[in-house]
């Protein structure tokens, strides 16, 4: 079962447009997703600020 998830499902998910866009963004920022520790990323504060702003915009009428 683990092999199916690892070799079939995850690669299929990585080919989805939204995931490709996210992976491309990580690459453009020089972030290695396999070695990511969110609290240690220099760009994390900007990411969190953008996320908070998007949440506020969704909640406002």
Image: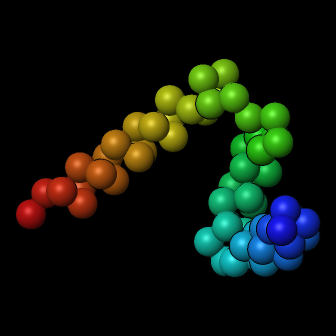
**From what the image shows, is residue 15 above or below residue 2?**
below
* Residue 53 percent coordinates (x, y): 32, 46
Task: Say which residue appears at 24% left-offset and 56% top-offset.
Answer: 57
Instruction: Identify the coloring.
Output: rainbow
Q: Dividing the picture into quarters, in which one does residue 20 lie?
A: bottom right
Instruction: Out of 43 and 37, give the one closest to the viewer.
Output: 37
Task: Say which residue appears at 69% left-offset and 55% top-offset.
Answer: 25
Q: Dividing the picture into quarters, in which one does residue 11 lie?
A: bottom right
**From what the image shows, is residue 21 above or below residue 23?**
below
Residue 25 seen anywhere in this rendered image of the structure: yes
Residue 14 lies left or right of residue 38; in this view the side is right
Image quadrant holding the N terminus, namely: bottom right
Q: Residue lying furthest top in this view? A: 40
Instruction: Out of 19 and 46, give the one closest to the viewer.
Output: 19
**From what the image shows, is residue 19 above or below residue 32?**
below
* Residue 56 percent coordinates (x, y): 23, 49
Q: Dividing the picture into quarters, in which one does residue 31 lie?
A: top right
């Amino acid at each position: 079962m683990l092999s199916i998830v690892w070799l079939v499902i995850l690669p299929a998910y990585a080919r989805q447009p939204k995931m490709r866009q996210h992976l491309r963004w990580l690459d453009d920022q020089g972030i290695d997703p396999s070695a990511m520790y969110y609290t240690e990323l220099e760009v994390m504060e900007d990411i969190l600020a953008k996320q908070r702003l998007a949440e506020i915009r969704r909640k406002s009428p």
